[in-house]
Image: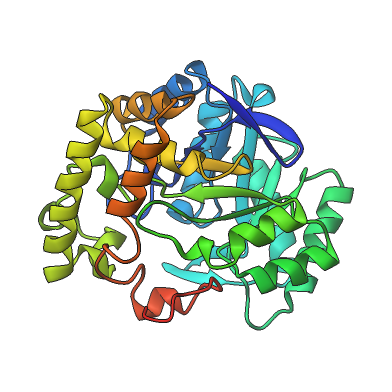
Amino acid sequence: MLQRKLAGRMVSEIGLGCMNLDHAYAKKVDQATANRLLSTAFEAGITHFDTAALYGFGANEKKVGEAIKGFRQDIFLASKCGMVGLNGKRTIDGHPDAIKATLDNALTSLQTDHIDLYYLHRIDPNVPVEESVGTLGDMVKAGKIGAVGLSEVSADTLRKAHAEYPIAALQTEYSLWTRNAEIAVLDACKELGTDFVAFSPLARGYLAGGVDPATMGEGDIRKGMPRFQGENWLANQALYDEFAELAKGAGITPAQLAMAWVLAQGEHIHALPGTSSEAHLLEDIKASGLTLAPELLTRADELVNRSTVKGARYGAGAQADIDTEVFADE
């Protein structure tokens, strides 16, 4: 597994997002399965693991903490605050006291004395971002976290926060079919020396194949996303079939082509796929170090992009909670 710098540390260029173990896709795995999956990931060379207070409304951090306790000292651990589950609902709270309490809970759940990278998961519109980030900076000084990150923010917010305390990493969705980061955030990260972590590099499973909205379980967040609905989905499925043929012609899987494309967009970019399947995990990591012809990457870029993908990234409700730039026609 090749490595890249993240928050001053060399880590695997492909990490593992652990949300899938508890949250968002209507599937949960038990502790034994989580233990096997994360151990397999570590043994395969993954050293970057990502979770959040929100995932499973606290259950995910506990599950991850138990799974990694045998190799915690050998990995880079990231988590997030600022959005938690309260009374069965998502709650955004960027006040200093809330951040500190969430962090202390995370340290206990993760069975660790520090978290290497701690993101502000969402910007609280009622709290200046400088206040939230300043609190996280204090937590670095206290030795509880190693570095400060932001999630799902605009370039302007990144710059504002970075002026208060150095932002080591920014995490947002980025893939062939989600290009919002190309509006301004990728360039801002380069400008400020902020590493970029791309979640959902496989387009929430779309670019890995086998996704069928008709079989998604109750609670699967993709059911509320316009790209997986109605005529949008029919068009996107036909587009995937072309993409799969392109990958097949190159002797790789669609997931590997999609991941390799993300990694090829810049040395400061990390790919953070999520899965609860060991088979998918082992398939994904083969994208590390792939040497693909520039013509193949260009063809993938031309085939799947914001002009060819149908439907907005999020519905109106979810979009209202994030601070990222949107294209004029979204």
Decide if residue 283 is on the left or right side of residue 189: left
Residue in the picture at 57% in, 48% down? 197
Closer-to-camera residue (295/222): 295
In the rendered image, the vertical position of residue 13 relative to residue 239, given as above or below: above
Decide if residue 290 is on the left or right side of residue 309: right
Residue in the picture at 43% in, 47% down? 19
In percent of width and height, residue 184 lies at 59, 67
Decide if residue 43 is on the left or right side of residue 235: right
What colour scheme was applied to this rendering of the protein?
rainbow
In the rendered image, the vertical position of residue 36 relative to residue 13, given as above or below: above
Tag count in the figure?
Answer: 0
In the rendered image, the vertical position of residue 33 relative to residue 231, given as above or below: above
In the rendered image, the vertical position of residue 73 relative to residue 166, given as above or below: above
In percent of width and height, residue 63 lies at 48, 37
Q: Quadrant of the C terminus?
A: bottom left
Residue in the picture at 49% in, 75% down? 321
Q: Is residue 71 visible?
A: yes
Extreme residue toward the top, this view: 43
In percent of width and height, residue 36 lies at 40, 22
In percent of width and height, residue 21 lies at 39, 41
Extreme residue toward the right, this view: 141
Residue in the picture at 15% in, 46% down? 241
Extreme residue toward the front, this view: 295
Closer-to-camera residue (42/22): 42
Closer-to-camera residue (309/151): 309
Q: Is residue 276 visible?
A: no
